[in-house]
């Protein structure tokens, strides 16, 4: 959400910022609706003042025996009440229209975000590790997993349809081991381990920007939504709160299942575990003061990178351009891990700074002074996506005979096993 007062004061700045994201100018229609709301509020105030003045005169007329005047005044009060009710209905509709306009608009990009139309314009900031040279043709993760008899898409499809998987034996243990190692690393960096709800109210989804924009990408029950990421639950722990400044930054991590319909990605990555309807992820969320925001962003990037480095998986760091930013992000770093079977890097984590965009939607503030409550900044990122990390381990650590070497860092989490298969 956005500060309507700020839009009134500098509409060009907002239109210019949205233009960098490829969004048409919006402030003219926003301010037109805002003007209608302000006019309706003024008319309500006038009608209320007339009602109150007439109400005071009724008692005086009755005491002085002016019954005819009292009846006229009562009629005026009744008329004013009808006007107030009608204006209230109009005002409610105008406010709802303005809310829908503002809630459907993406965050403004940070000034230093590179300009671009899409993924091809993202900027590579760094690379870590050298992709392994194989003396055989590396297999894809799903071929490896199925050959091991421990990755079963067919059985999952019988009960759930496509884009689900059953993991068994050592691969199920590997999935758990990866999550446990990630949680140990992130809690060691000061992120509080949290076990949040997987079902949330629509207002929680709206608070972090999943609604109304991405309703079709989400799964819902009669009253709740299944979280597409623990970002929703973790960030909403501070909704409608005023935090003490000395409690910031507030850092949280959680390992949860995530649920996405992937409505907007039809035909993409339908084979294997890259893009599933249900997947596990270790999420990082930080709630901080605005002046801490940039440092927190870099710290979260470092924490996510540390997992890949401990697993000795080659990756690169990308800064997303304006045309590829997520809806709620003002600045985003992507981590892309090397997948030998595809001979390319694939996204394994997005770490985003949302500024006060989500905080305004959630009414999440902090006490900057005795009478100075300000909106917090919120940041989120994967630390990491567990399924995609499993994919990367299988492909980068595969042997020619189909067995998988266990990364040294995971051996203690795998009960001492050094080979899968």
Image (tube, helix red, strand yellow):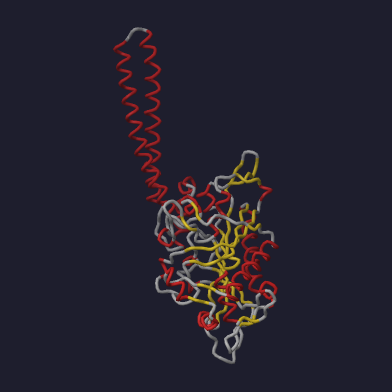
Residue at the far top: name it: 65
> What residue lies at 60% left-to-right and 76% top-to-bottom?
170
Q: Where is residue 354 in the image (x, y as percent from the top left)?
A: 54, 57
Q: Position of residue 407 (x, y in %)?
A: 66, 78
Q: Which image quarter holds the C terminus?
A: bottom right
Residue 217 makes an appearance in the image: yes
Please indicate whether residue 79 sits to the left or right of residue 109 in the image: left
Q: Position of residue 405 (x, y in %)?
A: 64, 82
Residue at the far bottom: name it: 135
Near-viewer residue (192 or 304): 192
> What residue lies at 38% left-to-right and 29% top-to-bottom?
46
> What residue lies at 49% left-to-right and 48% top-to-bottom?
3
Q: Where is residue 47 in the image (x, y as percent from the top left)?
A: 37, 28
Near-viewer residue (382 or 68): 382
Q: How many labels does the image show?
A: 0
Please indicate whether residue 9 sits to the left or right of residue 174 in the image: left
Residue 211, relative to residue 181: is it above or below? above
Residue 357, relative to residue 155: is it above or below? above
Residue 342 makes an appearance in the image: no
Please indicate whether residue 337 sits to the left or right of residue 277 in the image: right
Residue 162, relative to residue 83: is it above or below? below
């Amino acid at each position: 959400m956005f500060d309507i007062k700020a839009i009134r004061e500098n509409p060009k700045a907002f239109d210019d910022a949205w233009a960098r994201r490829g969004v048409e100018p919006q402030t003219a229609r926003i301010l037109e609706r805002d003007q209608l709301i302000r006019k309706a509020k003024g008319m309500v105030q006038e009608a209320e003042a007339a009602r109150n003045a007439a109400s005071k005169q009724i008692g005086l007329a009755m005491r002085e025996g002016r019954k005819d005047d009292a009846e006229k005044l009562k009629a005026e009060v009744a008329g004013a009440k009808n006007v107030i009710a009608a204006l209230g209905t109009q005002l409610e509709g105008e406010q709802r229209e303005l809310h829908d306009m503002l809630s459907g608009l993406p965050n403004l990009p940070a000034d230093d975000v590179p300009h671009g139309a899409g993924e091809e314009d993202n900027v590579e900031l760094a690379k870590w590790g050298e992709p392994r040279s194989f003396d055989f043709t590396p297999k894809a993760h799903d071929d490896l997993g199925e050959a091991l008899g421990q990755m079963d898409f067919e059985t999952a499809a019988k009960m759930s349809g496509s884009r689900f998987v059953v993991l068994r034996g050592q691969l199920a243990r590997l999935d758990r081991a990866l999550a446990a190692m990630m949680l140990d690393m992130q809690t060691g960096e000061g992120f509080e381990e949290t076990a949040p709800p997987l079902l949330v109210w629509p207002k929680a989804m709206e608070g972090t920007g999943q609604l109304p924009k991405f309703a079709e990408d989400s799964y819902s029950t009669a009253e709740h939504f299944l979280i597409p990421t623990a970002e929703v639950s973790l960030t909403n722990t501070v909704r409608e709160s005023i935090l003490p400044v000395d409690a910031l930054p507030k850092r949280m991590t959680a390992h949860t299942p995530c649920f996405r319909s992937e409505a907007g990605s039809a035909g993409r990555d339908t084979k294997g575990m890259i893009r599933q309807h249900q997947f596990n992820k270790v999420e990082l969320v930080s709630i901080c003061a605005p002046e801490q925001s940039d440092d927190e962003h870099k710290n979260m990037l470092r924490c996510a990178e540390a997992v890949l480095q401990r697993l000795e998986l080659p990756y690169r760091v990308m800064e997303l351009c304006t045309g590829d930013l997520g809806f709620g992000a003002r600045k985003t770093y992507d981590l892309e891990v090397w997948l030998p079977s595809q001979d390319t890097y694939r996204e394994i984590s997005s770490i985003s700074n949302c500024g006060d965009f989500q905080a305004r939607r959630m009414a999440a503030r902090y006490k900057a002074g005795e009478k100075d409550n300000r909106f917090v900044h919120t940041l989120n990122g994967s630390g990491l996506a567990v399924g995609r990390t499993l994919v990367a381990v299988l492909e980068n650590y595969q042997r020619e005979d189909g067995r998988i070497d266990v990364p040294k860092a995971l051996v203690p989490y795998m009960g001492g096993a050094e080979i899968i298969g």
